[in-house]
Image (spheres, rainbow, N blue to C red):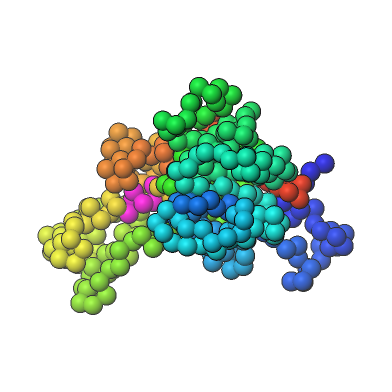
């Protein structure tokens, strides 16, 4: 019977499992598993897409404080390859690569299959690893039948491809899809979600939440540190501490011992917006984090973030993020609406990764 990586921590490893009630030393604690990924590059691969795949992995290692994942750049011949933007990248021969759990194909616009590539793709599709492709490269997997019988997320086919020839495909209307041992996504903007899903299945949702919080902090503009009135600094602190329930602007001004008009002047001079606008931005950012956590319904999120109606919440959210709140809901909530991301992914070592978690 296959054991998931999370079951390993439940039942213990080796002698330590028989020492119930005892405090384990650092050396006796089970070591967290490492997710090993091989990126199979082709000439003129999309560097932007590859960078979007690598950044979540780098950040996961940074925030975890140890290597939760490792990756290697691979190619058929192990030669230096040029990305579509001309940047050269060193690679290792695919048949000389270190052991990996996931192999992801990164190609360019060339979707022609020569005999050697077809043979290699068919070989790896038959191996007990997870096989994926980024963007257009997914059509290469489709041409060798590697996506038959699984759901997949693919970009619109180019004129050179006869879509009718792929009648056995089961495409889904989602930016990315993980179904059993196959991983696909529509393009560079969806790659980050795919990597988050992979990391969440292997290392749990907690790591992804930490990554999202870090990204949110990095996205906030730096407030001026010089000549900023202490009253404004104190007001900003109050706002952050009272997102739910929120304080009224008059209440904020009264707490600071100034008039509402003076408070508005402070915000306009230092932040270029009104207190109400800044408060709304904070509430929308909080709403997005709550949606990602997938613990509350849309109406509950709207109420928790101080919106008087769902319609008002939807309108403000779309104006701020350019997307409907449903598009940012975690997979736990989406699964209740028929999410396509609910199948486990297996690895070479025979492990079965945890069921789908929010991305």
Magenta residue span: 282-287
Extreme residue toward the bottom, this view: 226
State whether residue 359 is above or below residue 278: above
**Image-quadrant location for residue 282:** bottom left
| The magenta stretch spans residue 286 | yes
Q: Residue 154, how many percent across, how many down?
A: 49, 35
Q: Is residue 351 left or right of residue 208?
A: right
State whether residue 275 is above or below residue 111: below
Name the residue: 41% across, 38% down.
Answer: 327
Closer-to-camera residue (359/49): 49
Extreme residue toward the front, this view: 115
Residue 4 visible in the displayed image? no
Q: Is residue 64 left or right of residue 263?
A: right
Name the residue: 27% across, 64% down.
Answer: 235
Residue 327 visible in the displayed image? yes
Q: Is residue 315 left or right of residue 143?
A: left
Q: Residue 315, how many percent across, how many down?
A: 28, 38
Name the residue: 43% across, 47% down.
Answer: 188
Name the residue: 65% across, 54% down.
Answer: 94
Tag count in the figure?
Answer: 0
Q: Is residue 212 left or right of residue 26?
A: left
| The magenta stretch spans residue 18 | no
Q: Magenta span: helix, strand or loop, mainly?
A: helix
């Amino acid at each position: 019977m296959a054991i998931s990586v999370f079951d390993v921590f439940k039942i213990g490893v080796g002698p330590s499992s028989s020492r119930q009630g005892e405090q384990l030393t650092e050396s006796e604690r089970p070591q967290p598993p490492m997710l090993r990924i091989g990126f199979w590059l082709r000439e003129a691969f999309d560097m932007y897409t590859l960078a979007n795949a690598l950044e979540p992995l780098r950040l996961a290692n940074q925030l975890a404080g140890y290597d939760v994942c490792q990756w290697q750049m691979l190619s058929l011949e192990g030669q230096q390859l040029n990305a579509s933007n001309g940047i050269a990248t060193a690679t290792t021969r695919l048949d000389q690569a270190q052991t990996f759990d996931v192999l992801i194909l990164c190609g360019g616009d060339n979707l022609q299959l020569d005999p050697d590539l077809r043979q290699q793709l068919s070989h790896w599709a038959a191996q007990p690893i997870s096989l994926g492709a980024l963007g257009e490269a997914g059509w290469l997997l489709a041409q060798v039948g590697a996506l038959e019988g699984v759901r997949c997320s693919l970009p619109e086919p180019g004129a050179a491809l006869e879509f009718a020839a792929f009648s056995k495909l089961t495409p889904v209307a989602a930016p990315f899809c993980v179904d059993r041992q196959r991983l696909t996504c529509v393009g560079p903007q969806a790659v980050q979600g795919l990597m988050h899903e992979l990391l969440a299945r292997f290392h749990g949702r907690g790591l992804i939440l930490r990554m999202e919080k870090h990204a949110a902090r990095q996205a906030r503009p730096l407030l001026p540190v010089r000549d900023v009135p202490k009253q404004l600094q104190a007001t900003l602190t109050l706002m952050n501490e009272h997102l739910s329930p929120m304080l009224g602007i008059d209440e904020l001004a009264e707490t600071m011992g100034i008039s509402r008009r003076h408070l508005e002047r402070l915000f306009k001079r230092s932040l270029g917006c009104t207190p109400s606008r800044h408060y709304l931005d904070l509430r929308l950012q909080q709403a997005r984090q709550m949606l990602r956590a997938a613990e509350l319904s849309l109406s509950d999120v709207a109420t928790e973030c101080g919106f008087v109606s769902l319609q008002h919440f939807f309108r403000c959210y779309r104006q701020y993020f350019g997307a409907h709140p449903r598009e940012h809901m975690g997979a736990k909530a989406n699964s209740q609406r028929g999410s396509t991301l609910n199948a486990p992914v297996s690895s070479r070592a025979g492990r079965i990764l945890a069921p789908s978690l929010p991305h």
